Image (tube, rainbow, N blue to C red):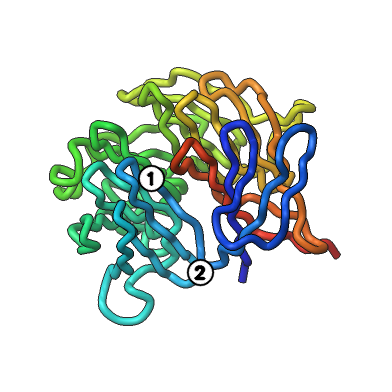
Amino acid sequence: MERRSFFKLSAAGAASVFLPAWGCSESHHGLAAPVLADASQGFQVFGELGGRALLDPLRNRVQLTDAGGFTRTLSAASGERDGFNYPIAAALDARGGVFVVDRGSSRVLYFDSRGELVFELGGHGTSGDALNYPSDAVVGADGTLYVSDALNQRVQVYRGGAATIAGGAASASFTHADWNLPRSLALDPQGRLLVLDAGLAEVFVLDTRGALVARYPLLSASGERLHMPRSLAVDSEGNAYVADYSRSSVLAIEASSGRYLSDLALGALGSGALAPLRVAMGPGASLYVATSPIEVV
């Protein structure tokens, strides 16, 4: 079982405490080193209204916390494990509800702000509105839901907000002939969709109609292509952050062009390096990073 940790980086790379800390920070090249925290229960995703969702895929648990701090444990069905089967991603909408991507069942489930299950999308398959290894979701300012349907090599698009999406049929499917494993999604300040293809280690930038605006490889400072990047987030300034698991770093780039900006090193815990699994933008333009220690043998 993986052990996860969280710490918080500002857009400038400064770190601060998010949960009870494991250790103290040190300055390094003008930036504060990360203050590690114990977050073994999963990772968080944040909404515009101040709410957040806590996902714990290994324990099949999802919790929704509203802006007032009240937390509800969500249930996709009665009985064991709350009906989830590896809930891997979530996206909160403007109503305070949450779309939960349940990878194991190839479903997306929508819960309202009270934590009640309203409807579900998908189901395992390779055609139509079925999903195959869904891995991420984001919600646009207009309520459009984008879901990365990774093994079907497409992004499913559901327009019109939760009330319309409840019908179950996708409004469109975004595809590209070269896509290999479109795994992670993010929206830039202009509302364009960034698709991280983990298999290619490339980012595709699409407009709201699905037309390709830009495409670029994910390269380190030395020009080395990343190996199976895990997750992508974009801040309000148009900077993108990529969880680079293989190099135990977070790559900071320009979202529009892929131009290299910086590497945010994650440090180590005991005898192991810390590798990022997920990145997410949080309150105060902060970048939340879920990490897992890699033991050195």
If the image is split into quadrants, where does the C terminus sit?
bottom right
Q: In the picture, residue 140 is in which quadrant?
A: top left
Q: Quadrant of residue 242?
A: top right
Q: Is residue 123 left or right of residue 206?
A: left
Asked whether the viewer can see residue 180, the reply is: no
Of residue 42 and residue 133, the one placed in the foreground of this image is: 42
Label at residue 58: 2
Residue 31 visible within the image:
yes
Classify mark 2: helix, strand or loop.
helix
Q: CA distance from mark 1 to mark 2?
A: 19 Å
Position of the N terminus, as image quadrant, is: bottom right
The x, y position of residue 163, in whole percent, is: 13, 46
The residue positioned 46% from the left and 54% from the top of the image is 44
Q: Residue at x 62, y 27 (%)?
A: 217
Q: Mark 1 = which residue?
A: 137
Q: How many C-alpha atoms fall within 10 Å of the one at disc 2: few (<14), some, or many (≥20)?
A: some
First of labels 1, 2 by sequence position: 2
Q: Is residue 217 left or right of residue 92?
A: right
User: Is residue 290 depicted above or below 198 in this figure?
Assistant: below
Taking the image as shown, residue 91 lies to the left or right of residue 258, namely left
Residue 172 locus on image (x, y percent): 27, 34
Residue type at mark 1 is Ala
Provide residue 193's location: percent of width, then percent of height: 40, 29
Residue at 53%, 22% in the rendered image:
215
Q: In the image, what residue occupies the spot 48% across and 36% down?
A: 285
Residue type at the position of mark 2: Leu
In the rendering, which numbered label is found on residue 275? none
Which one is in front, 129 or 213?
Answer: 213
Is 153 placed left or right of 8 in the picture?
A: left
Residue found at the very far bottom of the displayed protein: 79
Evaluate if marks 1 and 2 touch, with contact meaning CB atoms under 8 Å apart. no
